[in-house]
Image (tube, grey):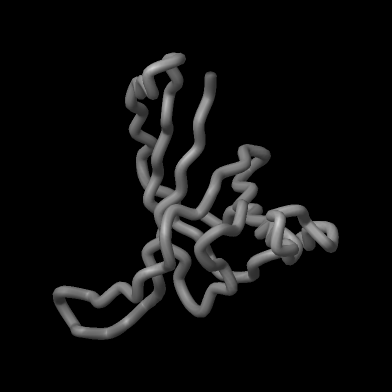
Amino acid sequence: MKRSVTIIRPGPVDAFGDHTAPSTEMSDTCLWVIGIVSSDDDQNGKQNRVSSRVTCYPLGETIVRAGDLVRVNGFTWQVDGNPARCESPFTGRFPGYEVNLKAYEG
């Protein structure tokens, strides 16, 4: 099933970490296969928060990279690390990429 995927790339930052340009939004034209979401309760010493993670498989060439935000069906996730190239264990072909997404609440 084709997913509505928008990639939000933050603008560049200066030496102080302030954004010097606005974020840009791009639509990704690949077919994205979305995995099952898993959630964990995290505690960072001050507050409890819930982290949700999902593994996605964009089939074809994708423009997503580490640090981007990805909006999938109205929910915004952060890309966790660089996309990894997937290899089929049956044919050895490279059909697409594996992208890990994460989000926090609380």
Q: Nearer the viewer, residue 78 or 90?
A: 78
Identify whether 5 is placed above or below 104: below
Identify whether 10 is placed above or below 59: above
Residue at 32% in and 82% down: 94
Residue 88: x percent and y percent? 23, 75
Residue 49: x percent and y percent? 45, 20
- Whether residue 56 can be seen here: no
Residue at 43% in and 66% down: 82
The image shows a total of numbered marks equal to 0
Q: Does residue 69 appear left or right of residue 59 in this picture?
A: right
Residue 33: x percent and y percent? 44, 56
Q: Which residue occupies the extreme front position in the image?
A: 15
Q: Which residue occupies the extreme right position in the image?
A: 21
- Whether residue 4 can be seen here: yes
Residue at 40% in and 53% down: 100
Q: Does residue 103 appear left or right of residue 10 in this picture?
A: left
Identify whether 92 is placed above or below 72: below
Residue at 54% in and 48% down: 78
Q: Which residue occupies the extreme top position in the image?
A: 47
Residue 73: x percent and y percent? 63, 43
